[in-house]
Amino acid sequence: MKTVYEAFLCRVRDAGNIKIYGAGKLARSLYLLFRRLGIVVDAFVVENVDGNPGKLYGRPVISLEEFALQDDCCLVAGMEKAPVAKSVLNMLMSREVKNIIAVPCDCIQEIYCNFVIDSPSSEGLCQMLSSAKRVILYINDMDGGIAAQYLQAKGVGIDVVCTDLKGFPMNFPKKNVQILSTEQLPEGDEDSAVLLTMGEPWLQSRYITRLRARGFEKIILMTKELKQEIREEYKKPVWEGNGEGFRVIEGCNVEEDHYVVQRRSDGKEYRWRVHFWDQFFCSEEQLEAVGNGCLLAEYERQYPGFHYLFCEETPLCQVEEAGGRVQVYMVRFHRDKRIEAFSLPDWITQIQAGAALTTQTISDIRDDTGDSISARNTDYSEGTALYWIWKNTQGPEYVGLFHYRRQMAMGKNSLQDIMQYDAVLTVPSYVPEGIRDFFCRRFIFENDWNLMMRFIREYDQAYFETALVYEKSHFYFPCNIFIMKRKYFDEMCSFIFGVTERVDAHYQKMGLNRRDRYMGFLVENLLSIYMMHHGGRLKGAYMDMKYYAPLKD
């Protein structure tokens, strides 16, 4: 059954030769809505042309008398308030106007919720906002934050950000932006433009009602298509618009909601992995660091000499062997999601992580034999496989760890290239807010981080000094994916598990059963701290990550 709003639109679509009564905000909103829906409007009709523009949106504004001379036309008429709408409709009928489609008062808010800018593009949005005397952004989600970053990067001046979300991060390039609640928002005027970013119609309706009650007339709603365009485009002004040689790599094989940026410097290539949402947490200082070269200098201080290792990607089964010098273990789990099938070469061996938690056997090698922490997999994640490899294997000069869905994107000669280095990882992640804040916001508790730091200090004061710098830095190597010389692997694992075993024992003593993979995230950070601590000693590089998205059932 059609809603009142849907029934109204159906009547308009079926009528043809549409003209709209009035030249005010409702008439204009109707025109923009109809145009968006492909409904052609011939003209605007007013009772008296005096004091009205000659044209609106390129359509003539004609008098009611002129309209009465035209045959076979349909007039869409309505007003915001029911008594006024009734009066107007009475007047039109007394003038014997035929074919009137009355705008139901019940769907006025839905019409305003579909009011869009003249141009459906991001450029059109920027132009419209730039012409406004004052620009106000009403934000209640991350899409709104991204819109704010994008608009300011494009040079749109934002005067006020209004939000009702408590504790919502508001880091914008310009420090003079006011952050206000709805109650603090000043009275509106016709020269101010308010951009609403929320997507749900009921949310739009509620906020529009508030804003109109405060006197705001120019209220702009972002369509889903426009929000998607900004989401795709907003990263470019931040990275490519600063003149420092960064560029966003299009079509890069990267996880969902991530992208990769690249820069060349002194004959070396650097690539960093960035999460869409995390870019919103850029402070003014971090955005400036992108543009003035400080970001590259910081990365070099963290991981001196670790640069990007390029290859022409080929399937893993086509990568040339390395004479038995490399053994990589690919982690599997009995609840793995279905992915695109691929063949494995002899230098990759599958290992079942968390094997102690199931009776299923999906790999010849399981992590619940020998010296094992397999039963702790719900906390350690792939860390239980890492521990097993460390404690139960010897042999090849190089050892590595891949996941069944995340690997290194390798070329035909990649193994030979990798053996020129002590350690090779995947593209480092850049987190604008700082590593400690990033992980404590998204993945773990602050107490987890504090315990890690405490036990790093107990393990080795020199590592602790590195960790103090690391936690305030902005780059880490993600996902525990690597290929490295066995002697450094053993040294790294001794450090990693020397710390995690103490954290684990602390929580075990408390009787706390977590099962939230927190230890896997600590392992990820400890790996990066190890690389940072030995950056001047190790010859390192990194490669692109090959990511397999789960297949839809």
Image (cartoon, grey):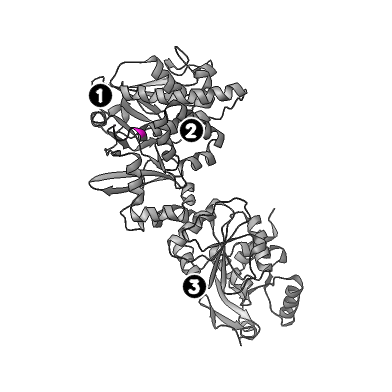
Q: Position of residue 121 (x, y in %)?
A: 46, 62
**Do the residues bearing badges 1 and 2 touch, measured as CB atoms within 8 Å?**
no
Q: Nearer the viewer, residue 421 or 538?
A: 538
Q: How many marks?
A: 3
Q: Taking 288 as reference, is 423 left or right?
A: left
Q: Nearer the viewer, mark 1 or mark 2?
A: 2
Q: Nearer the viewer, residue 505 or 515?
A: 505
Q: Position of residue 145 (x, y in %)?
A: 52, 54
Residue on which disc 2 sits: 453
Between the C-alphas of marks 1 and 3, the distance is 62 Å
Q: Nearer the viewer, mark 2 or mark 3?
A: 2
Q: Which residues are magenta?
A: 533-537
Q: Is residue 229 visible?
A: no
The residue sitting at 37% across, 53% down in the picture is 290
Q: Is residue 488 visible?
A: yes
Residue on which disc 3 sits: 131
